[in-house]
Amino acid sequence: DAMVIQNPRYQVTQFGKPVTLSCSQTLNHNVMYWYQQKSSQAPKLLFHYYDKDFNNEADTPDNFQSRRPNTSFCFLDIRSPGLGDAAMYLCATSRRTDRSYEQYFGPGTRLTVT
Amino acid sequence: GQSLEQPSEVTAVEGAIVQINCTYQTSGFYGLSWYQQHDGGAPTFLSYNALDGLEETGRFSSFLSRSDSYGYLLLQELQMKDSASYFCAGGDSSYKLIFGSGTRLLVRP
């Protein structure tokens, strides 16, 4: 089945220790998104790619970086995680920008910072 | 920018009908989406309204009024499995989704 896959599902890292979260998709969608979701809050968009074009949200901290080496894969790098970065990180895709209203989400990576 | 407001929590009885409202303020607006998210799960797409009016998908219907900057999700014949959080989301000219604050629906037996 075509899907969005995130690895790992759970990640524990130490304060200040870099961490990378990965997302892959078999949907062949050209738009990929990274969201941060904290408990009982809405998903908050960090950045998105339209093909290789990177779009950063104005309020996304510099501590967060992303790479998309090809259509199928996208990575979220947190360079120096703080306690406030503990959250669920969701990857999503959409077929193209004019269908961005229908996004397909992966199961998420729950990040714990100790 | 955009902001979308929803009630924080709604409780209803199994078999009943419930309406979850969403009001929005936006400088650019391309339609309203609805997503369902169970605890610990990922959001899943439910419906989309590009134009004013009602869209029906099985037990779920969604409504949009652009003139009132308002929409709602209607769930009929509620089932216990409908207990989840529901988010409205607005699409803007940059083809991003801005999610509303979310409504936690609790279905009681």
Image (cartoon, rainbow, N blue to C red):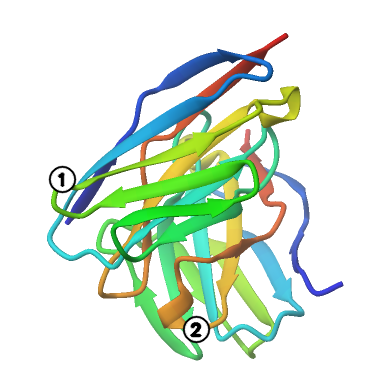
> Which residue lies at the image location 41% right of the left edge and 81% below the top edge?
A98
Name the side, left or right, on which A80 lies relative to A7: left
| Rendered position, A94 above or below B51 | below
Q: Which quadrant would residue B91 be assigned to in this image? A: bottom left
Q: Disc number at residue A96?
A: 2
Amino acid carrying mark 1 in the image: Asp
> Which residue lies at the image location 31% right of the left edge and 51% below the top edge?
B64
Query: Which SS class for mark 2?
Result: loop
| Rendered position, A9 above or below B18 | below
- Give the letter of the chain under mark 1: B
> Which residue lies at the image location 69% right of the left edge and 67% below the top edge?
A22
Residue A95, image x, y percentages: 56, 81
Residue identifier under label 1: B68
Query: Which SS class for mark 1?
Result: loop
Q: What is the C-alpha distance between the residues marked 1 and 2?
A: 29 Å
Amino acid carrying mark 2 in the image: Arg
Which residue is more in the foreground, A31 or A6? Answer: A31
